[in-house]
Image (spheres, grey):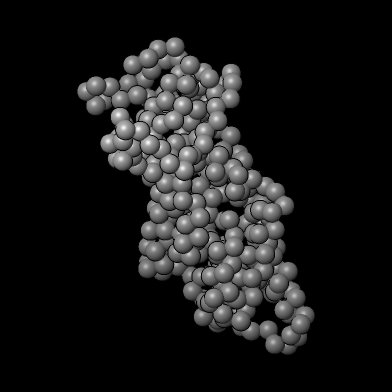
Amino acid sequence: MHATDDATRAMLGILTDLDVPRKGTVSLSEPTSLLSVEYQKLIDKESNETIWDDMAFLLRRDTNVSFNYLMLMALAGAITAAGLWSDTLHLIIGSMIIAPAFEPLLRLPLGLITRAKELIPSGLVSMTTGYLALALGAVFATTVLNLWEPGAKPALAEQRWVGYWSSLSFAGVLISAFGAIAGPVIVSAQRSVMTVGVMITLALIPSMGIVGMGLATGDLGLAGQGFIRWLVDALLVTVMSAAVFGLKKRFLHHRLHALSWAAGAWLWPSSRGKTMRVGTKKHP
């Protein structure tokens, strides 16, 4: 079956209502083009809003715990540590582009809003292991730099970019909030490659790198400041993403994840614009 993005949401809702995803397999793919003389007007008006199940698949594929995922996070930590050590901004930005560090945080609010229970524990595991690898990468790079340049250790807390990403300011938190809102919108539009731009607005990578650097140099105060900055951004991503997904569920999707814990129960807009609950074997 071929359908627009908007029609796919309704079609998958019917399949979920019939319990097809639990008793069989549903495979979704995106054609390079879709032409139909009879329905071309509908095709021309379609949006790029994907379905919950596509979002969940994308997030699992990019951030499930694997060698590639952990290696990229560790390398990002090492590079950001080198950039913070030398006060070199382009290295820090490069580490933000390398790390798949935004998507693990997105799995938690998506799982909560769509009731896709498997996303929550797997998201917590992915987030914890990923950011631990990032911090360890920063510890390793800082230790190597200390050994390579004995006696030349910079006063990290006095470095410009260390100070920026280990402190809280209204402007910095506001920018992070805007980035936290942009992230779930980008993923909803199936443009995950653009999340690298979101990472540049957030302090997630450099702040966790500062945690590792503080631990490596014995500066627990600096490590604590970095962790607080990371925690603020992580909470912003979680809360803002939950708000975006909640609004999308209310006004666009009208359904839960196909494999949610509310199996077979989903939301469908009535003819009067209200929302009613539909049972497993019933149709609106």
Residue lying at 30% horizontally and 25% vertically, measured from the top left: 269
Residue 79's quadrant in the figure? bottom right
Q: Nearer the viewer, residue 251 or 134?
A: 251
Residue lying at 38% horizontally and 58% vertically, measured from the top left: 178
Q: Residue furthest top?
A: 281
- The reply to whether residue 54 is visible in this rendering is yes
Q: Quadrant of the C terminus?
A: top left
Q: Is residue 76 above or below residue 239?
A: below
| Picture coordinates of residue 33, whole percent (x, y) | 43, 41
Q: Nearer the viewer, residue 123 or 239?
A: 123
Q: Is residue 100 above or below residue 23?
A: below
Q: Is residue 187 above or below residue 155?
A: above
Q: Nearer the viewer, residue 224 or 269?
A: 269
| Picture coordinates of residue 140, whole percent (x, y) | 73, 69
Residue lying at 53% horizontally and 70% vertically, measured from the top left: 93
Q: Residue furthest right?
A: 147
- The reply to whether residue 228 is visible in this rendering is no
Question: Total number of numbered labels?
Answer: 0
Residue lying at 43% horizontally and 51% vertically, measured from the top left: 186
